[in-house]
Image (spheres, coloured by chain):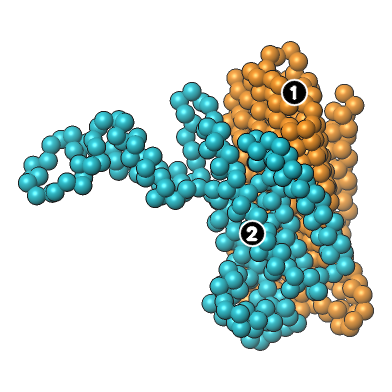
Chain colours: A cyan, B orange
Amino acid sequence: MTHTVHLTEDQLQGAADASLDAEQMRVAYGHLATCESCAADVARLRTVMTRAREANPGAPSLDGLWPAIRSRIEESKVVRPDAFAGPAAGARSRPPWLAIGSVALAATLFVAALAQMQGWRPRSSDGSQPSADVAFASAADSTRVYEDESRRLLNDLEMQRAMMGPSASASLNGDLAIIDRSIAEQKEALVRDPHNVALQRLLAASYREKVELLRRANNAG
Amino acid sequence: MLAERRVVALIAISALISLAARHVNAQGAAANEPLLRARALRAGSPVKMFVPSGSVRLIGWDRDSIDVRGQIPASAQLLFGGSDSAGYKLVVEQRDESATKASRLVIHMPRKSQISIKTADALVEVTDVGGWFYTVSGRIRIDGAMASLDVEAMSGDIDLDATTPWARAKTGKGHLVVRGSPQDVDASTIGGTLDIAAASIMHGRFTSVTGDIHYASTIAPHALFEFSTHSGTVDLLLPHDVSARLELSTVDGEIDNGFTQLRPAAAGVHNLQLSLGSGAADVTVRTFKGTVRLRAR
């Protein structure tokens, strides 16, 4: 159907991130059900938002990084971060090690922030992978993020199912059944072997596939 | 040996089919279909399309215009609107409630146009334009060069034979082929077979749920590959002189190592670490119960 009036940017954004209140949501979805242009815009916004989240779903916040950074600085014995907490008065002429320490701290923070932004983690000097615990926690975090996202997309999809053609609907149902079976098998295996990192990563990958499928299905209406 | 031949044969057959189809379509494009619309269009402008059924041939060219040729069934109409700078929207719409009939369109547009096309079951063939391509059960074939590709199908086949820095392709039970010279590839199927034969990939993520994954090519130095499947077979057919570190693991499947002349760095019933050559690239394979096959050619 061709519309002359479309949703505003705020409404599009709100529909994409589900931040509208119930009444606004009802109005927005009523419009989206008949306006292909706005529905496509919302789908695109969701893709952008999800991609941004996917860029590093399991990354700790910068706050979470601080204790590790602090401990590394203390271990290096270049300068204790406590020195920065002391009174500034009387420190008119700063000793040179303080300047070196400041630069080291700034550089460490910069590298940590850069690593977080790019989802990059340097290899340890012997080339080994991060510890199994960290890898497992990261995979488990990814699983949770994808699981939550798939639940949200399933809810959204309920409103669009009626508009979906029989071919798309059959394809969706078949593929969802395949993915759900694989998720069930992986979860069952995780109960038997709860610390298996590879298994946790496979589960995250299965949920990711489910999210991708539901996003595709949202476009099929 | 039989598996190797099957992989090579599969890729060769899909390449032949693709070439034949391209030849036929190129002839069609040159056959001067009736002109439906022609407008000026600035390079880089978006072009949105909805063509439910039939075939669409999209070709990037070096002119600053869009040229739409072909045939629309009598029961449908072509809606076309927009502007030179804002781009255009093209929709094939049924006039009545009857079943959608097939259209046949050949569309030329500036190479840097940003396509956004959606079909139900149409065949879409693309040369030298990038963007977003979506179908429910149709087929999508893409070749040439473009800035990026985002291709999605619910159940249709996808054939990428393009030169692009970034490609993402997803289908359900369709057959997905990745060839050409892409650099960063994220490709996945659910039940469909995923065939990869591109030596240019620097970062590849290949996933399926139950579909088999076949990789038959060399691996670029410093490339980073991740293969993951629940129950499909992951078949890696690599040159005997490939340089890569491989980390293969399966929860409940089998690992079949064809590089038997090398001593693995670590090996168990369900995992294998192997360094081939100087180990310049990193390859990780994970399956739940699918077989991992490593073959030398």
Foreground residue, A174 or A74?
A74
Q: Mark 1 points at which residue?
A: B269
User: What residue is at 41 percent from the left and 45 percent from the top?
Assistant: A65
Quadrant location, the C terminus of chain B? top right
**Residue A187: x, y in percent?**
72, 45
Q: Which chain carries label 2?
A: A
* Disc 1/disc 2 C-alpha distance (Å): 35 Å
Q: Residue at x 71, y 48 (%)?
A: A206
* Residue found at x 88% / y 67%: A166
Q: How many other residues sit within 10 Å of disc 2, few (<14), some (14-19) or many (≥20)? A: some
Callout 1 environment at 10 Å: few (<14), some (14 to 19), or many (20+)? Answer: few
Residues beneath discs 1 and 2 located on the same chain: no
Does residue B76 show up?
yes
- Does B86 sit left or right of B157 as displayed? left
In the drawing, what numbered circle is on residue A40? none
Image height of A221 relative to B281, above or below: below
The spot of residue A133 in percent (x, y) is: 54, 36
Letter of the chain that mark 1 sits on in the rendering: B
Provide the residue designation for mark 2. Answer: A149
Residue farthest toward the front in the current orientation of the protein: A192
Specify the amino acid type for callout 2.
Glu
Residue at the farthest bottom position: A4
**Relative image position of residue A59 (x, y in whole percent):** 50, 47
